[in-house]
Image (cartoon, rainbow, N blue to C red):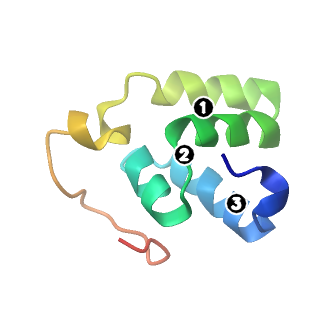
Amino acid sequence: MKKSPDLAPETIDRVIEMAWEDRTPFEAIELQFGLLEKDVIALMRRQMKPSSFLMWRERVTGRNTKHTQKRGFIEGRFKSDRQKT
């Protein structure tokens, strides 16, 4: 697992942004930054206020679009310019 100090502030901001996006799966974050879902959860826990973290966890828990294998589609309708794949 990559710890926060090893990640540039811009990278941490981008991971958080991607984690909040409904149609960005955890697999895309892993591919781009090498962070597993559990690493993203740990990063979010460290970087966010407790109430914001809980709100995010409620939002992504069980959300099919956050996991490639659970998605009913291959590609979403939107792709960020800053997303590698």
Residue at screen point 79% across, 65% down: 9
Which amino acid is tagged 1?
A: Trp
Image quadrant containing the N terminus: top right
Disc 3 and disc 1 in contact, CB within 8 angstroms: no
Q: Position of residue 48 (x, y in %)?
A: 78, 38
Residue 40 coordinates in the image, percent (x, y):
60, 42
In primary-sequence order, the first of circles 3 and 2 is: 3
Q: On the image, numbered disc 2 is attached to which residue?
A: 20
On the image, the x and y values in percent for residue 28 come to: 40, 56
| Residue 42 in which image quadrant | top right
Structural crowding at the residue carrying mark 2, measured as other residues with C-alpha within 10 Å and reported as few (<14), some (14–19) or many (≥20): some
Q: Farthest residue to the bottom: give it.
A: 81
Residue drawn at 37 percent across, 29 percent down = 63
Density class for disc 3 (Cα within 10 Å; few <14, some 14-19, many ≥20) is few
Q: Name above or below for residue 82 compared with residue 77.
A: below
Q: CA distance from mark 3 to mark 2?
A: 11 Å
Write down the quadrant of residue 67 in the picture: top left
User: What residue does disc 1 label?
Assistant: 56
Mark 1: few, some, or many residues within 10 Å (few <14, many ≥20)?
some
- Residue closest to the far front: 1
Give SS at disc 1.
helix
Q: Nearer the viewer, residue 38 or 49?
A: 38
Examine the rendered structure and indicate whether residue 83 appears above or below residue 42: below
> Which label number is shown at residue 13?
3
Give the alpha-carbon distance from disc 3 to disc 1, as whole Å: 15 Å
Q: What amino acid is found at the position of numbered circle 2 in the picture?
A: Trp
Tell me if label 2 and label 1 are in contact, CB under 8 Å. Answer: yes
Q: Amino acid at mark 3?
A: Asp
Find numbered disc 3 in the image and state the secondary structure of the residue it sits on. Answer: helix
Q: Is residue 24 visible?
A: no
x and y, in percent, of residue 18 in the image: 52, 54
Q: In terms of sequence position, does the residue under pointer 3 or pointer 1 come before the other?
A: 3
